[in-house]
Image (cartoon, rainbow, N blue to C red):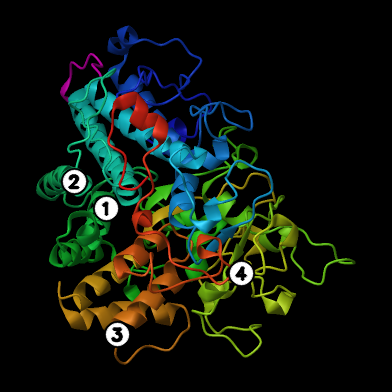
Amino acid sequence: MKLKNIFLSAGVIAASMTMGSCVGDLDLLPTSPNDITPGTFPSDPTAYMEKVMADVYMQIGTYGYGTDDNGSNILQSMDGGMSTFQRAVFNLEEIPTDEANWLPSGDAIDSNWQYGIAPANNNVVMGCYSRMMVIATLCNQFMQTDFGITTDAERKLFDEFSRQARILRAGMYFYLIDCYGNVPWADVSVKMGEVAPQLSTDFNEGRRLVFEAVTKDLEDVVAWYKANDPANKPPYGYVGLDVAESLLVKFYLNAEVYTGTARWADCFNHAEAVIARLGKGGFNNTGLCNAYHQNFAYNNKDYAIGGAGGNSEIIWTIPQQNPTLDKSNSGLKSYANGGFMCNAWIGDTNDEKDSFKCKQADYNSANGWKCMSARRQFVEKFDWNADFTQSPDVRTKMWKTAADGFSIDNPDCTAASWGKNGFLAVKFSNWHINDNGDIDRALSPEAVDPLGIDYGMIRLAEIYLSAAEAALNGGGDRSKALTYVNYIRTRAKMPAYTSISMSDLRDERQRELYTECVRRSDLIRYGQWISGYTWNWKYKQLHGTDYPSNFNVYPLPSTVCVRNGYTQNPNY
């Protein structure tokens, strides 16, 4: 059972996943032009289970089944590339923060999004919510489907895929709870065609109840693996014990925000369990890649669970492969994930006209969008010389900075001023990166568009930092906080701390995990999102100003509330 032969093959079949929709609120297209019905399943239950589960994974990795640029997107209300899962999360967690400034140029994202302004009728609010609910629905529908199973082997495969479906559903619900709050709980008991209920009309109670339901289910999955398959290592691209337990780390890290009750000890203990399994090999035998940028390179698949490298820093990976580079004539075309995280920053500059310099070839890419720049307050979190041309921190190695003529300031947020309104904080590239952190051109692919670079939704570095934060908050061995943060710093060629404060930890977390879809939730957890910290163009003010208090969550899409009778989030 290899993901590449199923998930990345052309024309993956969704089978029974009609998505008439247990959420009842989406404008959907069928996920395949093939007319396959559940009546065909008993002819080969194993093959059909693999095909149906493949579609669940495909809807995480791209936007649809087709070969056109919009991929026959199942979400009619939003641009295909923009609504892909990773970009949906990036939209929610990064663009309105101090890290990534989206430069509108008449494309699919609202020009006010970068300022944190998101009304309930916004198409990004709807598209991002819909993508995650569609995937949760697909997970449930797999578990509800009768595949005509008759053998023990078929039952074993169904049970394992069902556990994976529960893990992926929990992944969707982490971001739904984090970003939207009191969301409906669509578990396997909600049948196709039914509307998933909100568990309470009270925002705080509803959010807490969904959190408790999801984490209880995840705890059950983790307990099963530990009792029955403790050395679980799923094939490359699939999820298993490590993803499930890492999601629990993320849930418990933010538990006080979601429920009003901190869960630091639970966060620390689950992080320690993940570290015990994965913290081997690689950099100083920590389980981290030897070089930071290996996580974000063309060869990052080697460092995912099931990959060919000597360690597994990338715990939850979203596989990608440009079809033109795949010798089996298959692949997965997507304008999200690692390729998006490279091309959205970069673009060719005019050597004769522009005082700032950037080339797509610097990143081995055949395209560049010139859509993003970094805000000054984020850039200043790194060590720099006086004119911001050099930093000893290797995590800035791929950036375009003042040394390349880029301005650190953000006088405006327009696409026309790209190059003059912020550094390019690039960390992904289409190069093969070796253990020294250098480019190996001989092993690098040709420059193509779109780029086929995997994306790590969760890395072991995040688990180390989460364990450290939980420890500093009284959840575990405080001495490990210093040890774990110094693993991160020394790999970045930065001097080790001799002691560590919560402020040090927070800054190091940002430096390590920048633009990896954690920043908004981090700032909320720190109490620095609404007030207490500002950045350029926060709430549409040049030097920033406080957000309204209700901005701790986005609104539920207005269409969803009207169709399903849901209670809208407070003050929207």
Q: What element carries label 4?
A: loop
- Answer above or below: position of 24 versus 296: above
For label 2, the residue is 218
Q: Which amino acid type is shown beneath numbered disc 4?
A: Met
Q: Residue at x 44, y 51 (%)?
A: 92
Bin the neighbour count of mark 4 within 10 Å (Cα to Cα): few under 14, some 14-19, many 20 and up: some
Q: Residue furthest front?
A: 571
Q: Residue 247 carries which label?
A: 1
Q: Is mark 1 on a helix, strand or loop?
A: helix
* Stretch in magenta: 145-152
Lower sequence index among marks 2 and 1? 2
Q: Are marks 1 and 3 in contact (CB under 8 Å)?
A: no
Give the alpha-carbon distance from disc 4 to disc 1, as whole Å.
Answer: 29 Å
Query: Picture coordinates of residue 461 (x, y %)?
Result: 36, 67
For label 3, the residue is 501
Query: Picture coordinates of residue 101 (x, y %)?
Result: 57, 60
Foreground disc of the pair 3, 4: 3
Foreground disc of the pair 1, 3: 3
Q: Does the magenta stretch include residue 272?
A: no
Q: Are marks 2 and 1 in contact (CB under 8 Å)?
A: yes
